[in-house]
Image: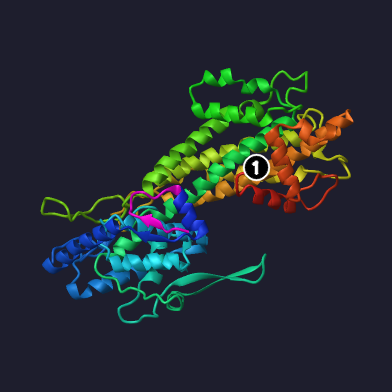
């Protein structure tokens, strides 16, 4: 596969996924190389002229006024990386680590951070060679960038000027035992780099701060979650329509003229997709006594539409952020005035914190309304004549009773996780960093919410197809018992996909979580 060209300003979400999940390789454009070299020249000039510039020859954070002697500048940068490698908790998945490395490379490629080309090329070689540092997921407050998690990556990239093996960080390795079994372990960064034939870098002035200061961790987590959320919403629309058919829904709520009267294009799009999915269905409008649906059915376009609008807005925010320069200070070698190094606040993660919190709320709502349909499908008082718990033999068999419990548990958990992390702030660094974004916490919570909603939708998938089977089996006309002749065209396709994946009709009780896992696996891609 052709390498992705990195210039710092044209990276796409699709390319992020390709690098993170498909191991696509990258390389700098010639213009990016030139920009990096030109910027570095000015950093060297600052050092020669002994000009005082934050992060180059001063301490960091509240220690900003401590001037560092020239012969200690390498030690200063190495100390920054080792002391800031303070993360705790489980390691981030490899795909997220790869996305982080890519975004940090892309930001540095713009040529405003003062890094040497040699150092950035080493980070690129690490990514292309599959050197994945072990990055603890906790420890970032989301301002001054993602200092702790980024430092754990740079601990592997860099080395002490005096001892190559000392404090070399950890690298994740995966040993495949069989098709279904693998062993995940870590080895020292020193060993991993040596085995890959890569030399770790002794950091020069400004490089440590250029490497560990930025919003790339929170942005990477949110970017991959956003990509998956788009797929999940598409799947949720199809699964909703299957539930609508199983419950013999009324089509009036999806009449196009209704949605044209409300000025939200995403709502109209969802209603149109639902109409396309149930086209040809013999179950829609088949309950002649039904006048209108309950809200979890009737209002689905009005709920899913704003969710889709939130995803679209998030694409804009994240696409901007993955092509932003977010460290400090920034170097402007082309500036026409004397001062060329400026301290600012691009490392503050508020854009990502807010959009991650919005996404948490939006996805939680997708799960909430899905859980209500699962309840409706499993309740004999609300499902238009289907048996209790969707079991052909209720009493002896429990059917999908506990699947609904699980969905309820997950929906309730999301209500806690959806509390906005961005409204909290706790001062750090002797109150110099007196307002922080908590963006990385928001992005990590977003991942959890997304995972929970995927599980809820997977359970609805099982319940909807169980309802469809029961509805078809109860039909009097033998000719009508072929699902292909009864269901909408798209509904029939997703019904067959679940059955072919090994989730069979629940004629009697069996281990439920095995079916749920199979359904979740299907939802990893568009169904």
Q: Residue at x 89, y 28 (%)?
A: 476
Q: Is residue 502 visible to us here?
A: yes
- 4 falls in the magenta region: yes
Location of the C terminus (image quadrant): top right
Q: Nearer the viewer, residue 317 or 12?
A: 12
Q: Position of residue 394 (x, y in %)?
A: 86, 40
Q: Position of residue 417 (x, y in %)?
A: 54, 46
Give the prevailing secondary structure in the magenta stretch. Answer: loop
Q: Nearer the viewer, residue 519 or 276?
A: 276
Q: Residue at x 49, y 41 (%)?
A: 359
Q: Is residue 441 visible to us here?
A: no
Q: Position of residue 474 (x, y in %)?
A: 86, 32
Magenta-drawn segment: 1-13
- 11 falls in the magenta region: yes
Which residue, given by chain and number where applicable, does mark 1 sit on?
A: 457
Q: Residues within 10 Å of mark 1 (few under 14, many from 20)?
A: many
- Could you tell whether 102 is left or right of 524 in the image? left
Extreme-front residue of the structure: 2
Q: Position of residue 342 (x, y in %)?
A: 20, 53
Q: Residue at x 18, y 61 (%)?
A: 53
Q: Residue at x 35, y 75 (%)?
A: 159
- Could you tell whether 145 is left or right of 302 in the image? left
- How many numbered circles are shown? 1
Which corner quadrant of the image does residue 208 belong to?
A: bottom left
Residue 1 in the image: above or below residue 387: below
């Amino acid at each position: 596969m052709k390498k992705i060209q990195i210039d710092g300003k044209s990276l796409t979400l699709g390319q992020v996924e390709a690098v993170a999940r498909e191991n696509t390789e990258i390389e700098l454009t010639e213009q990016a190389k030139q920009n990096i070299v030109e910027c570095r020249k000015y950093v060297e000039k600052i050092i020669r002229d002994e000009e005082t510039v934050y992060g180059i020859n001063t301490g960091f954070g509240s220690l900003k006024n401590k001037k560092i002697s020239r012969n200690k500048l390498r030690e200063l940068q190495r100390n920054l990386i080792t002391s800031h490698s303070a993360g705790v908790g489980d390691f981030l998945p490899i795909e997220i680590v790869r996305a982080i490395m890519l975004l940090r490379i892309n930001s540095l490629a713009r040529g405003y951070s003062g890094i040497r080309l040699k150092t950035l090329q080493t980070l690129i070689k690490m990514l292309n060679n599959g050197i994945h540092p072990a990055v603890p997921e906790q420890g970032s407050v989301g301002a001054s960038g993602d200092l702790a998690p980024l430092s754990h990556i740079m601990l592997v990239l860099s080395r002490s000027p005096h001892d190559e093996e000392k404090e070399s960080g950890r690298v994740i390795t995966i040993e495949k035992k069989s098709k279904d079994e693998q062993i995940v372990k870590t080895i020292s960064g020193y060993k991993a780099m040596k085995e890959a034939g890569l030399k770790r870098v002794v950091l020069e002035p400004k490089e440590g701060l250029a490497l560990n200061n930025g919003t790339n961790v929170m942005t990477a987590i949110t970017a991959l979650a956003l990509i998956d959320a788009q797929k999940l919403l598409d799947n949720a629309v199809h699964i909703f329509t299957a539930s609508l058919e199983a419950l013999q829904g009324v089509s009036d709520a999806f009449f196009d003229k209704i949605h044209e009267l409300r000025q939200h294009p995403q709502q109209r799009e969802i209603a149109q997709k639902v109409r396309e999915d149930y086209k040809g269905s013999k179950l829609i409008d088949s309950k002649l006594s039904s006048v209108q649906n309950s809200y979890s059915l009737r209002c689905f376009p009005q709920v899913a539409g704003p969710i889709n609008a939130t995803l679209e807005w998030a694409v804009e925010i994240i696409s901007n952020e993955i092509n932003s320069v977010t460290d400090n200070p920034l170097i402007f070698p082309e500036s026409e005035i004397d001062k060329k190094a400026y301290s600012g606040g691009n490392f503050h993660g508020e854009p990502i914190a807010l959009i991650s919190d919005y996404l948490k709320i939006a996805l939680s709502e997708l799960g909430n309304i899905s859980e209500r349909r699962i309840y409706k499908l499993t309740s004999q008082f609300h499902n238009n004549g289907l048996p209790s718990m969707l079991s052909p033999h209720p009493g002896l068999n429990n059917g999908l009773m506990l699947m609904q419990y699980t969905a309820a548990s997950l929906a309730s958990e999301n209500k806690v996780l959806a509390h906005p992390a961005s409204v909290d702030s706790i001062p750090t660094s002797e109150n110099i960093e007196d307002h922080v974004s908590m963006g990385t916490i928001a992005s990590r919570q977003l991942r959890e919410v997304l995972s929970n909603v995927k599980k809820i939708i997977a359970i609805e998938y099982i319940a909807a197809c169980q309802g469809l089977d029961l509805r078809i089996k109860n039909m009097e006309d033998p000719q009508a018992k072929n699902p292909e002749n009864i269901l909408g065209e798209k509904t029939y396709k997703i019904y067959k996909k679940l059955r072919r994946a090994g989730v069979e009709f629940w004629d009697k009780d069996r281990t439920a979580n095995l079916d749920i896992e199979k359904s979740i696996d299907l939802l990893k891609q568009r169904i």
